[in-house]
Amino acid sequence: MTKSEMTGDVYYPSQEIIDNAHVKDWEKLRQEASGNYEKFWEDRANELHWFEKWDRVLDDSNKPFYKWFINAKTNISYNCLDVHVKTHRRNKLAFIWEGENGDFEAMSYYRLHKEVCKFSNILKSMGVNKGDRITIYMGRIPEIVVAMLACARVGAIHSVVYGGFSVEALHERIEDSQSKVLIVADGAWQRGKIVPLKEIADEALQRAGGIEHVIVVKRTGQEVNMEFGRDMWYHELRSLPIASNDCAMEVMDAEDPLFILYTSGTTGKPKAILHTHGGYQVGTYTSLKYVFDIHEEDRYWCAADPGWITGHSYIVYGPLLNGATSFLYEGAPNFPYPNRWWSMIEKYGLNILYTAPTAIRGLMRFGDAWVKRHDLSSLRILGSVGEPINPEAWKWYHTVVGKEKCPIMDTWWQTETGMFMITPMPSSPLKPGSGTKPFPGLEMDIVDEDGKPVKPNEEGFLVIKNPWPSMMRTIYGDDQRYVDQYWTKYPGMYMTGDSARRDEDGYYWIIGRVDDVIKVSGYRLGTAEIESALVSHVAVAEAAAIGLPHELKGNAIHTYVILKDGFNASDELMETLRQHVGHEVGPIAKPEKISFMEKLPKTRSGKIMRRVLKAQALGQDPGNLSTLED
Ligand code: WT7
């Protein structure tokens, strides 16, 4: 890529990149799809296999409950596996996996298909039926992919809980989803230590009812408690005759649920975002193919965790739908040394790397030498997701990692959207820090408080103005909350919860969340979860959490706590409370700082005014204080 003197910070792709790309002219594709999005998505859907095709592409008769591919019959697991096993891809690697401790596994499509059938048969033997919920709580190991696909195959709804979450977060998600099976690993390797997943799950299960069976995958091998009649080892089940290599596919309606995934919202408990078999596969298949330009011989690495939407869409489903070879790595980026990632890119000849700004900033901190020790010439395309990427990190990623030849796909999207929404393609001119423009077929805008479009370069609320196939269908079990949270403030428009601006060239610049969601190292956390964890401690009467800028994490959690009578502020108590939040929600939610307070700023109706705390902490003007109590 070369930087044009004329246009300042605009980076143009090389002719080689464009010639190689599926989409050679991104603007042309955007124009073709504009105002014609049903046709655009229908053409893409026709690239996949369907047991029966749709009567209609879109049903928008009951907004905002949009339906896609009406009456079509499918199963995403068929398109991920069975389709490829019948072609030249049969012996192609689906996954290459490296454990943090150096363990290695390579799994062909043929073998993955068999493993998924075996797992599906185990689930069936436990009485799992179409529509049942199954919670999965594991690290980054191949079995998590097998487990997710097995759920899809038998028509069960998976609910993956990120392995970095802890007791209360897991308990809450098991209970809310009313799961009847839990799939868990004994542990996971992280920074040379074992995260005791089974132990955490045992504690969560003491709080939650409803789980009938626990399937335990052996990864770390330490001793774990196995409850008789409830807990069974996967490797033992796998060798039973019931776990045969063939398992008939459950035929699903396109609109049948595929999974729920919990994410943090403005208030209250996490929301279960629901995605379906039909539309979701069309969205993830197409977006990955066009944006990361997946080719037959590529080795692709999305370094996220399968426990987040990025992992669902772009480690598991998107790559498999494309018949790609993916790399999966279990552990920490800097273990045992800061060159771990670069050494694996060199070792496996990886072509595409998709990660988050926080990881880039973290690795940048160790200096260029760790990167330069390795031959990274296999890399062709880089990607970023999770939060705005600061131009400094963008440039380092582009120069030091990508050697100025790899375009960076800065993809803006959400758990709710299922797929990339604002994103470049390899043929797009790039501006560091901007995700460029909406994906073909999407109409987006930036509006003011009243829903009116703002002028170029003015900040406003980011909204989506038309439906897309991989959009969430509802909040599982709470249709009303779905309508209220996303579709009520601006009638007819989907509210993203982000603020943004658009420049004269139509490029979008994301500014950040406008609600009580904090992005910590790209992870999405709600102030409510952190606050309830604090208040669940005996010493705490009231708590407030806010996000403040942090060099590596993007944002860090700062909390304000009022103690109950009889408890005194001390460094020791502060540490106890930090550990308590880590134990309840997860290590990612541990507050950076806890300030003990006598009082919290509240509205007259008793709501904590977090923006006042934030303004104070940043030394800014707190703005309108007319609703403040006193
Ligand atoms: C929120 C969604 C979907 C992938 C992982 C996050 C922020 C996401 C970007 C980006 C600026 C971004 C937004 C969004 N975000 N990608 N490229 N540039 N901000 O999914 O956990 O549902 O979070 O992440 O604030 O609303 P998520």
Image (cartoon, rainbow, N blue to C red):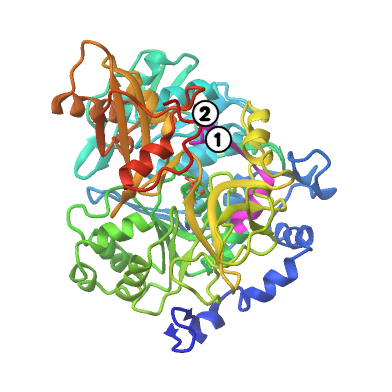
Q: Is residue 552 magenta?
A: no
Instruction: Give the residues in magenta.
Output: 263-285
- Please report the residue visible at 56 percent of the width from the left and 69 percent of the height from the top: 503
The percent position of residue 52, horizontal first and vertical second, equals 78, 47
370 vs 602, nearest the viewer: 602
Q: CA distance from mark 2 to mark 1?
A: 8 Å
**Where is residue 357 drawn, in percent x and y?**
37, 58
Q: Which residue is mark 2?
A: 134
Element carrying mark 2: strand
On screen, residue 482 versus residue 184, left or right, reads: right
Please check the rendered image and state whether residue 282 is part of the magenta-colored stretch, yes or no.
yes
| CB within 8 Å, label 2 to label 1 | yes
Q: Is residue 238 visible?
A: no
Q: Where is the C terminus found, in terms of image quarters? A: top left
Q: How many marks?
A: 2
What's the residue at 84%, 49% (across, down)? 56
Task: Give x and y (percent) for residue 166.
Answer: 34, 29
- Is 561 on the left or on the right of 478, as rendered? left
Is ligand 1 less than 8 Å from the beta carbon at label 1?
no
Q: Which residue is mark 1?
A: 151
Residue sitting at x 46%, y 48%:
311
Q: Is residue 533 left or right of residue 420?
A: left
Residue 157: where, in percent of width, then height? 58, 32
Picture quarter with the N terminus: bottom left
